[in-house]
Image: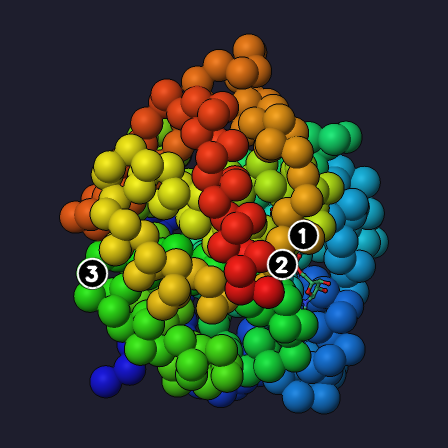
Amino acid sequence: VPLTEMVIHSRIRDYSVRFESTPRFLEELAAAPATIFIVDETVRRLHGAGCLRALAGADVIDLAVSEERKCLAAVEELYEQVMERSPKKNLVIVSIGGGITQDITGFVASTLYRGVRWVFVPTTLLAQTDSCIGAKTSLNFRRFKNLIGTFYPPAAVHIHPPFLESQEQLDFFSGLGELAKLLIMGGEDDTRELVRMLPLLAARDHTTLLRAISRALAIKQSYIEEDEFDTGRRNMLNYGHCFGHALETATGFAVPHGQAVLLGMLLANAVAGARGMLSAQREREYAESVLLPLVRIDAAGLAVADEVVVEAMGRDKKRTGAALPLVMIDDNHEMIKVDDLQADEVAAALARLRRTLAAGA
Ligand SMILES: NC(=O)c1ccc[n+]([C@@H]2O[C@H](COP(=O)([O-])OP(=O)(O)OC[C@H]3O[C@@H](n4cnc5c(N)ncnc54)[C@H](O)[C@@H]3O)[C@@H](O)[C@H]2O)c1
Ligand SMILES: [Zn+2]
């Protein structure tokens, strides 16, 4: 029996994630009173006559989406557009789009009247498999990415894989990076299942996507329910992200997030290998059977100086060059966080990754 619903427990409010095989759920949402849809304009253009046909007579605000627009100015414009409709506090916002749409509209929903009912329909693999649960909303401020935000879970999330058919290949493979991270964190059985599913996932087979996405969300759920406000165990979800965020920053966001996470897992595994926490054979298995087949960045895409990466990793810290935090996986599929990563280990891991990517090209 395929999974049709999960309930995420949150100290703010429990919420449901529904796996939808048809777009009929949108007819119900469109028929409900006081509902305003905020839709990524690209998704509306691509799916207006398909998945989104139920929105034909609905009240829709089109949202222009870009990382530069994930800011307070875009939020103010939405307050403006929503208030023009003289809404009441019982207003419902349904947002449809990827992680950027989620972050902007989640922030709007959490702050308008101190919180209105919000339903999220993720349309990218990254949003379906990862960001749609966890209750974080984030905005960029000046040069600070995700500086401003709130914890605000949606009332419901609806996952419908056919939206993913139109995703750009690089974005889709970026989402596969986050999906792979979560399934690897699930342990040996999930990792083996991931390897088996990989060809059908890459072909965007709906049934396989639903199975993998629901499993990835269940794994993420086990981390966030224990530590909703991100003070301890949830840190482990940063596997691939310690190096990943630094690569994104160091390349001026030329490497998409999920791709940076894949490279970040290869780098974390290289450090774990060098420290004797991960055997050479395991490191090679992760690289060859899961991570490298999903990487769409070549050696030229990693043309950044080691010092720039080290500096980007230490940006949150007072002293750069000091020891850095890193989440790794060990031979027993346990996640381990250390706080003593050294600059020379970063350089060695980068050199190794560059050799691997050059050999594959
Ligand atoms: N709140 C969280 O917990 C959280 C977690 C991870 C990432 N994020 C944020 O998510 C953002 C990245 O989100 P993302 O990768 O989901 O994508 P996105 O929202 O940035 O969208 C990427 C591009 O794909 C387009 N698009 C969206 N759906 C599409 C579809 N079905 N077909 C074709 N094109 C489509 C968009 O218009 C955009 O051009 C980042 O800003 C990141 O910081 C938030
Ligand atoms: Zn991520």
Q: Which residue is mark 3?
A: 188
The Cα atoms of the two marked residues, 1 and 2, are separated by 5 Å
Q: Is residue 327 above or below residue 315?
A: below
Regarding ligand 1, which quadrant of the image does it lie in?
Answer: bottom right
x 67%, y 52%: residue: 301
- Taking the image as shown, residue 4 lies to the left or right of residue 126, namely left
The colour style of the image is: rainbow
Give the mark, 1 or 3, whose residue is nearer the N terminus. Answer: 3
x 27%, y 50%: residue: 280
SS state under label 1: helix
The Cα atoms of the two marked residues, 3 and 2, are separated by 28 Å
- Taking the image as shown, residue 26 lies to the left or right of residue 58, namely left
Residue type at mark 3?
Glu
In terms of depth relative to the viewer, which is nearer, 265 or 354? 354
Q: Which residue is mark 1?
A: 301
Residue 269 locus on image (x, y percent): 36, 45
Q: Is mark 1 within 8 Å of ligand 1?
A: no
Q: Is residue 169 above or below residue 334?
A: below
Q: Which residue is mark 2?
A: 298
Q: Is disc 1 in contact with disc 2, using a CB cutoff of under 8 Å? A: yes
Q: Dot 1 surroundings within 10 Å: few (below 14), some, or many (20 or more)?
A: some
Q: Dot 2 surroundings within 10 Å: few (below 14), some, or many (20 or more)?
A: some
SS state under label 3: helix
- Taking the image as shown, residue 53 lies to the left or right of residue 258, namely right
Choose mark 3 or mark 2, whichever is in front. 2
SS state under label 2: loop
Q: Is mark 2 within 8 Å of ligand 1?
A: no
Residue type at mark 1?
Gly
Residue 228 locus on image (x, y percent): 35, 39
Give the mark, 3 or 2, whose residue is nearer the N terminus. Answer: 3
Residue 210 locus on image (x, y percent): 39, 77
